Structures are given as structure tokens and as C-alpha cells.
Amino acid sequence: MFKRITGLLRPIQKHFTGKTLVGSDKFGNKYVFFEPHEDSKQRRMIECVGGVYDKDKIHKLWSMWLNHTRDDPPTEEDLEDYDRQMEMLAVRVKKVEEEDARKRLEERMERGFQEDSSKASSVNVSGMFEAMNTDQDQQKSSGGKFKPDGWTPDK
């Protein structure tokens, strides 16, 4: 009943405000379009839940529409396709990172860097960088022994 009344009132609201609801997202944000008048340009806005804007709760496709990089507002199908593509991309990125970490480990082992078995079996990229930094810290430096006056170039 409420949806029917709202549907009947939308044309009246649009007539007086020029505002048209074009969609909403899973967070409850509403996206509106203002019809341009003679001296104004097209405007797109978001009506956030609770009146608090949180950029992390705005879908990328809706953000593109708000910034006029997308002509039409996204449909539910567009949003689902985009989310599915992002999930597939995340899986591919994880595979590439794991393969890269494995190759780095193999290269380090070939160069003679020995690590304990827990680090060697792990495919944690951040752990790899920590191990590399630890090896660099353990290398001895001759910086403390160098004296500028104690060396002269051969002629």
C-alpha cells in the first residue's frame, strides 16, 4: 500500500522539486537526479542513510554515475556483474601473489639464503619481506671501520 502511494506521489514531487529517484543500494542510500532547468546543468546526488556520507558504503558503479563518468544509473544486473568480476579479480591476484612469493623463495634458496622450514613452507608475501630485511640486518658492515684519512688512491 505504501509503495503504491509513494509511486503516485513521485510525479508530484518531481514536478515541484525536479528530483527523480533513480535507484538505491544495499546500504539504503538513495540516488537522485535533478532535471536541468534553463540556466542549470544536470545534477546527480546521493541521499545517504542517516544523512552521514560514508565513501566506503558507495558502490563503485554508483560513484561513477554520480561523477558523470557513467551515463545511465547502474542496474541490479550491472552491480552483480561488477561484484562478480571483482571477486574473480581478487582470486587471480591472490594466485599471482602466491606464485610470485614461491618464485622469490626459490630464487633466494638458489642464492644460498637458508630459512627455517616454517618460513620456507609459508606463502605469505609479508613474511618474505620480513625475512629479507632480517637477512640484510644480519649482514656485517664495514662502515664502522672506515676512516677517511686512512685511505689514499693508488697512483
Image (cartoon, grey):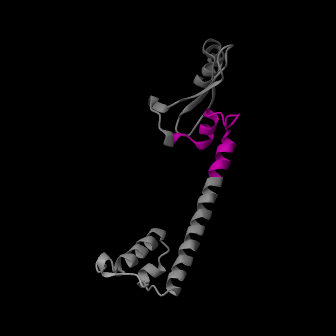
| Position of residue 57 in the picture relative to residue 61 (left or right) | left
| Residue at screen point 58% across, 37% down | 25
Q: In the rendering, at what x and y percent does residue 142 appear?
A: 33, 80
Would residue 124 be visible to someone looking at this image? Answer: yes
Residue pushed farthest front? 155
In percent of width and height, residue 50 lies at 45, 30
Q: In the rendered image, which quarter is residue 32 located in? A: top right
Quarter of the picture containing the N terminus is top right
Quadrant of image for the C terminus: bottom left
Residue 70 belongs to magenta span: yes
Q: Which span of residues is magenta-colored? A: 57-84
Residue 17 pos. (x, y %): 60, 15
Nearer-the-camera pick, 13 or 63: 63
> Which residue is nearer to you in this view: 76 or 95?
95
Q: Main secondary structure of the magenta part?
A: helix
Please name the residue shown 53% across and 86% down the image: 110
Residue 19: image x %, image y %? 62, 20
Quadrant in which residue 99 is drawn: bottom right
Residue 147 visible from this viewpoint: no
